[in-house]
Image (cartoon, rainbow, N blue to C red):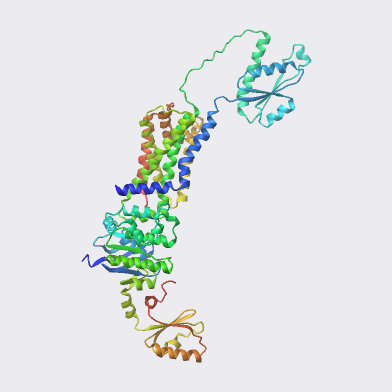
Amino acid sequence: MRTFWQLVLANARDIGRDKMSLFWFLAFPVLFILLFGFIFSNEGTPTYDVGIVYNSGNPLADGLVKGVSAVPVFKVHTGDREGELQALKKGKRSLVVEALSPSFATMAGGDPLKVQVYYNETQPTARQVLLPVMEQLLSEAERRMTGRPKVFDLVAEPVQSSDLRMVDFLLAGILAMALMQLGLFGAMRAVSLREQKILKSLGATPLRRSLLLVSEVVVRIGMALIQTFLIVLIGYAVFHVKILGSWLALLGAVLLGALTFVSMGYMLAAFPRTEEAGIGLVQMVQFPMMFLSGIFFPVEIMPSFLRPVVNAMPLSYLADLLRQIMVAAPPEYSIATDIAVLGGWAMASFVVAARFWRWE
Amino acid sequence: MRRMDAVTVSGLRKTYGKTVAVDGLDLRVKAGQVFGMLGPNGAGKTTTVEILVGLRTRDAGEVSVLGMDPAREGREVRSRIGVQLQARGLYPRLTVKEIVTLFASFYDRALPVDEVIEQVGLTAKARTVVRALSGGQAQRLGVALAMINDADLVFLDEPTTGLDPQARRGLWDVIRGIRSRGKTVFLTTHYMDEAERLCDNVAVVDHGKIIAFGSPSDLISEHFEEQAIEFSNSVSRDREKFEKLPGVTRARLSENAATLYTRDVPATMTALMQLATGDDIHIDDVVVRRATLEDVFLKLTGRRIRE
């Protein structure tokens, strides 16, 4: 037992004094949360800049300004034609609207009044969303002017869905990602212990190798708990993310996730000879998982041919499990599936790691 | 029996692919001695030590360490010995004291940490992290880790390689201290003077085989009744001319030096001086010495130990 604690202490000290690994372990996930948290927490009320070409002497321009200003997501700018188009080109306007001066024909009551709308082709929202809004605006104006009665009246009523914000969704995913990185990169330490012949030094003593391995895993799990605490704390303090599920369930999920990825890490660590090669290997595995497991993008937007890949990745299940426990997110998979898949990965990785592991 | 022989090895063989590292090695190390395995790099010294401490398996032969077979009872063997490895690594961000404390926790009979650090002269560096140590300090830390177990047998693989002369002598004192506590030391070295001054018994190895075995003085007198006359010589390549001098049994010429082994130093010297004044030979820096283990190695292999 004394030997075990000495090993844990030695490991913790060696890692704790390594500034680089401390950064990846503590600062990196925190930065991720703050960064993405702030980006997505503004998402609630997007505004679009709409430019209106204001020609004096055109009575329609005043009506346009009035009508467009009434739409809450539109921020109205007025100016001359040249200036507004310039602003559109620079990306400072989403739309520029101009009421063309009425011609004789329109005066005579033949052709309709022309309202010219310019939009930025590189902004898909402009064409898909803003143009219909403008059209709607004009037809409403037309109806009033012509005095035609309303046939349909749209009644919109909000229904309280589960109060899930993007930040809630993200926080659980980032915790899952942090656990993955801790496990995968953490096992690379074993490669570096092997490369630096530290394992060999220890091999010349009566120390049991299984004890060494257990102490490494215990230190990793301790780090996983610290990380979880930190991430949950920041989520609560900065973004008011409350943990809805039970703490015990969260602890269980975190332990299961940490074990799965530590096992996976040791599986990957069995093969490379140098730490550099090991890190390359881990990057190849963790990068696709980071972006395809629905942590930053919902799985729904991925092309269907990627779905089998997504469904094979353990991170998809850990993120889903944590989201369900932490913020009661709607399930992607059932909790039983999550646990079974994670446990399966943990077991399979452990078997491969045990089979191919080299001490030197 | 166990009290007599700390280590016995017979017919030990180990190959790596086509390379034969150890080729039928026989050894016997008496308890209470400093035993030295002397040989050039690549002679199979490290492989032998790693087999003896159970880090490697052997291909053939019998091995007994403290009466046990390290291949079958590796953990038991390792709990009763101390080991310093040549190619080893330690947690780079731990201090000397932390590392020694960690290793002390591996053994049932560990010596006090501070005492061992003191013995290898690292007390002033006890709070220094491993990666900030100089080469010599790291070597001494390795020896401390071999000493922390209060073991009967200590293996030291090239303990003084890369040390300056003063540090080497300091380590010799440490090793003699281990012996004075009644323990057995098994060390490897490629330094002739180290083997000669430190070891009670020496096995000279080359290409995985023992080519000579015995105490340093026995080995020297067995192979040389003669003394050696050395001088710098960059002109004459005529070995026969030197070997005809009175008393000379053999002559060795290298690029810019010559060694004459002689039974009669005054007669050889007189003749040599005459040769030098009369002939076209320029002789300088003359040294007369008794033969060393280096001469033994040279005689047996035709090579110098560090070539």
Looking at the picture, does residue A142 appear above or below residue A45? above
| Residue nearest the viewer, comparing A97 with A10 | A10
| Residue A306, horizontal then vertical, whole percent | 48, 35
Q: Quadrant of the C terminus of chain A?
A: bottom left
Residue A67: quarter of image = top right
Percent x, y of residue B295: 39, 78
Where is residue B304? Give x, y as percent: 42, 74
Image vertical order of residue B29 relative to residue B91, above or below = below
Quarter location, residue B74: bottom left
Left/right placement of residue B237 relative to residue B111 reads right
A253 vs A138, left or right, is left
Q: Which of B138 and A330 is in front in this view?
A: B138
Question: From the viewer's perspective, is residue A89 above or below residue B54?
Answer: above
Instruction: Point out residue A343 in the picture as x, y percentages from the top left corner.
Output: 36, 37
Q: Nearer the viewer, residue B105 or A316?
A: B105
Residue B14: tell me if it is visible.
Answer: no
